[in-house]
Image (cartoon, rainbow, N blue to C red):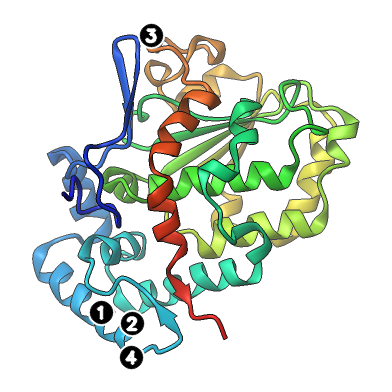
Amino acid sequence: MVVSQHMLTELEKLPGVQLGDFLLQFELDEPRESVREIARRELREIPEIVEPAVEELKRLLSEDTDMHVPLNNEAWLIRFLRPCKFYPESAYDLIKRYYGFKVKHHKHYDGLTPSKETNVFNENVLTVLPTRDQCGRRVLVLELGKKWKHNKCSLDEVFKGCVLFLEAAMLEPESQICGAVVIFDMDGLSMQQVMQFTPPFAKRIVDWLQECIPLRIKGLYIINQPYVFNMVFQLFKPFLKEKLRSRIIFMGNDRELLHKHISPKCLPDCYGGTLTIPKVTGPQWLELLLMCDQEFIAINSFGFKKK
């Protein structure tokens, strides 16, 4: 049985983890009317544009013999059309960059599934807030300071955990429309941790965010950063284009600035917010992601054909 056309695999029921009164799940329903309005306004998402765009993207992909993709899955096609505002040629180019990046960095992507990457979630340095922010965006939080034991969990593992989260967000229609923001909580970052960052790592992350990810990354918020964080940022700076650079905001301990970008109603009390739903831990998200292991296997089965 197909519980959602937004997934490639067939599941008996939508995966969910009950946390007290709160049910944690991926939101695979059709967008609410307020979000549909954003899609119409910002993404040109109206039937007379969407239908021909889907057909044209399908045609472009069907003529490309180098790639194996789920051509007849309309939800999958829309996943790439939305961040490109329904311009089919742009979506086609994005698909090629998305899969090209996976080929280039195959040592991180081959067989990437939640069940093989449990460590980063169990280390609890990576989580998504339980609710969306006031703009409907998913909020990913990375705690790469005092909580991060870099000898137990490498930066490559953190990257792979982020890939899994953002691939999961790509399944959600409201995330496709509203996008995501990322909070980097650098509280307690040490010199030893700074030394883990290298130029090739920085370039990979920036390439991924700028060129290859079919999700609208609307803001990167650096909070609680100590002075040594400047050394880390210097590695990333040469690779940043203006659009992404303008979305990076250094906030330090300024909670008012953070609340200008993310409403306190959507933030836990550790960030000066009033969200009453408890923070979802890495292991709790892992439990949900593990239920979708088959979906990640399906995601990995598409892309450029092996030469």
Residue at horizontal 90%, vertical 32%? 191
Q: Quadrant of residue 147?
A: top right
> Is the C-beta separation of discs 1 and 4 under 8 Å?
no
Q: Nearer the viewer, residue 142 or 294?
A: 294
Kind of residue at badge 1: Lys
Q: Would you call the spot at circle 4 few (<14 residues within 10 Å), some (14-19), or many (20 or more)?
A: few
Q: Which is nearer the N-term, disc 3 or disc 1?
A: 1
* Residue 21 shows in the view: yes
Q: Position of residue 189 (x, y in %)?
A: 79, 27
Badge 1 marks a residue whose secondary structure is helix
> Is the C-beta separation of discs 2 and 1 under 8 Å?
yes
The correct choice, above or below, for 257 with respect to 85 in the image is above
Q: Which is nearer the N-term, disc 4 or disc 3?
A: 4
Tag 4 residue: 63
> Is the C-beta separation of discs 3 and 1 under 8 Å?
no
Q: Would you call the spot at circle 1 few (<14 residues within 10 Å), some (14-19), or many (20 or more)?
A: many
Badge 2 marks a residue whose secondary structure is helix
Q: Identify the disc placed on residue 276.
A: 3
Mark 1 to mark 4 CA distance (whole Å): 9 Å
Instruction: Please state if 55 lies on the left or on the right of 180 as rendered.
Output: left
Tag 2 residue: 61
Residue at horizontal 52%, vertical 21%? 281
Kind of residue at badge 3: Thr
Q: Quadrant of the C terminus?
A: bottom right
* Residue 261 shows in the view: no
Q: Quadrant of residue 169?
A: top left
Q: Identify the disc placed on residue 58.
A: 1
Q: Nearer the viewer, residue 228 or 73?
A: 73
Mark 4 to mark 2 CA distance (whole Å): 5 Å
Q: Position of residue 141 (x, y in %)?
A: 55, 31
> Is the C-beta separation of discs 4 and 2 under 8 Å?
yes
Instruction: Please state if 170 lies on the left or on the right of 10 as rendered.
Output: right
